Image (spheres, rainbow, N blue to C red):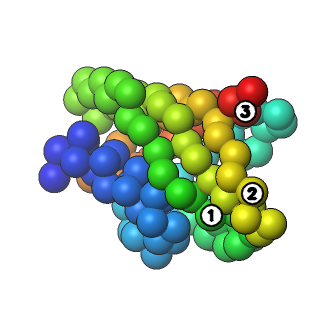
Amino acid sequence: MTTKEIVTQVIEAFDNNNVEKILSLFANDVVWSMTGTGITIMNGKAEVEQFLGGMDEIKMVSSTRDHIIVEGDTAAVDGLVKCKGKDEKVFEMFYADFYELEDGKVKKLSSYVIDKK
């Protein structure tokens, strides 16, 4: 699979709230940092799984992929993500994700999110 195909599969797995698929595309020692209202850093699949499992109150509705730029094993994607909270309220955030792949798996993911006002 190409880098673009792998990244597209990750995004589709997030859109479908498919934690198992997301984890299958991540390296065991993945590092995922999220920056927005705060900073969250996850080291390894177990921490990612714990984080995603704790998001039962928030479900992805959809996302756009405004740009996908790929160079070798690195990709950048930006767009708008729409989520639904436990109270069924929908909210939107702009995002930019930077992927680094190794051996066909996501080794590092840097995510930047900001609420759409």
The percent coordinates of residue 76 (x first, y second) are 40, 28
Residue 30 visible (yes or no) = yes
Which of these two is toward me, 23 or 17? 17
Q: Earlier in the sequence, mark 2 or mark 1?
A: 1
Residue count near mark 2 (Cα–Cα under 10 Å), binned few <14, some 14–19, many ≥20: few
Residue ID for mark 2: 89
Identified at 76% across, 45% down, the residue is 40
Q: Secondary structure at mark 1?
A: strand
Is 84 left, or right, of 105 in this rendering? Answer: right
Give amino acid for label 3: Asp
Q: Earlier in the sequence, mark 2 or mark 3?
A: 2
The percent coordinates of residue 77 (x first, y second) are 41, 31
Give amino acid for label 1: Lys
Residue ID for mark 3: 115
Identified at 47% across, 45% down, the residue is 63
Which of these two is toward me, 24 or 90? 90
42 relative to 78, above or below? below
* Quadrant for the C terminus in the image: top right
Residue ID for mark 1: 59
Give the distance between the C-alpha atoms of the residues marked 2 and 1, in whole angstroms.
Answer: 11 Å
Which of these two is toward me, 64 or 26? 64
26 relative to 106, above or below? below
